[in-house]
Image: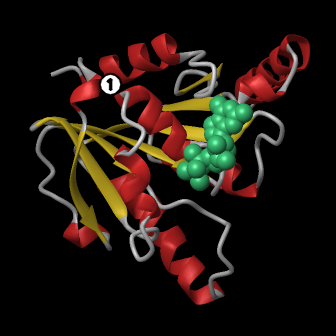
Amino acid sequence: LNFTKAEFFQSAPTLQQCPPESGREVAFAGRSNAGKSSAINCLAGNRKLARTSKTPGRTQLINFFNITPQQRLVDLPGYGFAKVPLAVKRQWDQNLSQYLRERQSLKGLILLMDVRQPMKEFDTMMLNWAVEAEMPVHILLTKSDKLKKGPAKNTLLSVRKHVKEANVDDLVSVQTFSALKKEGITQLEQVLTQWLHI
Ligand code: GDP
């Protein structure tokens, strides 16, 4: 699969307005600043691609990028940065969990967390929803270049241990990733290619 073919396709403010559920898609989620745009851009070899999702007004939208007409990457709204009213936050929680449960074309979730602060409240929440929906999850511990090899490896092992102890290791995998150093791209591409394979 040639990820450099990825191009912006469509934005949707709600689940009801998403494109038709044909083909296969993989969604990217993470707290704001986790490195989601950088990861998507790095994968696509295009520094501007995910900028669309940073355009004011588009931050709360689900953004779809086509690799082929039947294979998509989905950029879910960043989470936890803006001080949104609780009612809006609840609505978003509902949207996200519904998307994971009901979206037929969704084949997996890439969950990004800063390697220096993994498994925050949002991450655990997304992970639980995905597992409840029996949706495969691949965790990216991002910005791995910010830590020395030893500490980065320790975080990787401890998140893997958490996954194993929660008995969800059949659905959940974990890797370290750096968009800056282009570390872990091959591993990420392998997961995506498997999920998006037609
Ligand atoms: P998003 O809000 O999740 O889309 O996060 P961004 O991709 O915009 O990244 C947030 C900040 O982290 C930016 O300042 C990026 O330059 C930085 N960043 C993202 N990925 C990496 C990485 O792999 N290494 C380092 N050192 N910084 C990164």
Q: Where residue 34 sits: x, y (%)?
A: 65, 46
The total number of labels drawn is 1
Res 168 quadrant in image: top right
**Left or right, 137 with reference to 164:** left
Q: Is residue 173 above or below residue 88?
A: above
**Left or right, 97 with reference to 22:** right
Q: Where residue 183 sits: x, y (%)?
A: 60, 15
Tell me the kind of residue under disc 1. Answer: Trp
Q: Is residue 59 above or below residue 8?
A: below
Residue in the foreground of this view, choosing between 25 and 55:
55
Say which quadrant the C terminus sits in.
Answer: top left
Residue occupied by mark 1: 195
Q: Where residue 74 sits: x, y (%)?
A: 34, 47
Residue located 22% across and 62% down the image: 18
Residue in the foreground of this view, choosing between 57 and 157:
57
Q: Dot 1, how many residues are within 10 Å of its Cα: few (below 14), some (14-19), or many (20+)? A: some
Q: Quadrant of ligand 1?
A: top right
Q: Is residue 38 above or below residue 162?
A: below
Q: Is mark 1 within 8 Å of ligand 1?
A: no
Does dot 1 land on a helix, a strand or a loop?
A: helix
Residue located 16% across and 58% down the image: 19
Residue in the foreground of this view, choosing between 196 and 169:
196
Res 52 quadrant in image: bottom left
Q: Where residue 3 sits: x, y (%)?
A: 29, 25
> Can you see residue 142?
no
Residue located 50% across and 45% down the image: 37
Q: Is residue 28 above or below residue 168?
A: below
